[in-house]
Amino acid sequence: MVDHMKYQHNITSEIINNIPVIYIEGDLTSDADGDAKNVYSEVKEQYSPHKVIINFENTKYINSSGIATLIHIIQDVNERGGIIAFVGLTEHLKKVMNIVGISDFVQMYNSNNDAVKTV
């Protein structure tokens, strides 16, 4: 019997006040890499957004592959002169973002409402 995926994820998006919000639920690992990039690409193609919010309220775990995916998205948004905001990071994930330096390139908020009002 095959063991079900060790890491599980669900990556979706919606638009709030003309700003795309990407939701990362579960684990952001190499298993989620393709889905995360695909959802971001779809958002980018459909909306050409200047602002992007990534919501981590239901994210349980991020490994180095997940960090690399986030860096890819951040670089793409920054190259187009855009703004990226992270929402709902746990204290642990905030520390991780600080350690790897991502927090220097994104704005962090507690909720989608806070981010939408400010970005």
Image (cartoon, rainbow, N blue to C red):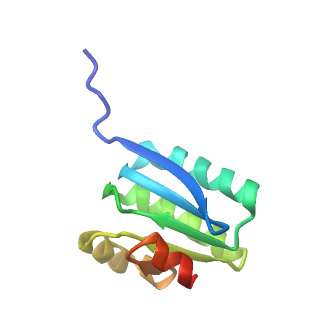
Can you see residue 28? no
The N terminus, quarter of image? top left
In-image side of 95 versus 38 (left or right): left
Q: Where residue 99 appears, x then y in whole percent? A: 33, 78
In-image side of 10 versus 49 (left or right): left
In-image side of 109 versus 106 (left or right): left
Count all numbered tags in the image, as a single digit: 0
**Residue at 46% in and 85% down:** 104
Q: Nearer the viewer, residue 77 or 53?
A: 53
Q: Where residue 35 appears, x then y in whole percent? A: 53, 45
Can you see residue 102? yes
Q: Is the residue 40 above or below the residue 117 in the image?
A: above
Q: Is the residue 89 above or below the residue 58 in the image?
A: below
Q: Is the residue 47 above or below the residue 99 in the image?
A: above
**Residue at 53% in and 58% down:** 22
Q: Where residue 18 appears, x then y in whole percent? A: 67, 67
Q: On the image, which quarter does residue 79 sit in?
A: bottom right
Going by the picture, which residue comes out furthest to the top?
Answer: 1
Q: Nearer the viewer, residue 60 or 1?
A: 60
The C terminus, quarter of image? bottom right
**Residue at 47% in and 70% down:** 112
In-image side of 20 versus 81 (left or right): left
Q: Nearer the viewer, residue 35 or 55?
A: 55
Q: On the image, which quarter does residue 56 sit in?
A: bottom left
**Residue at 29% in and 28% down:** 4
Q: Where residue 100 appears, x then y in whole percent? A: 38, 75
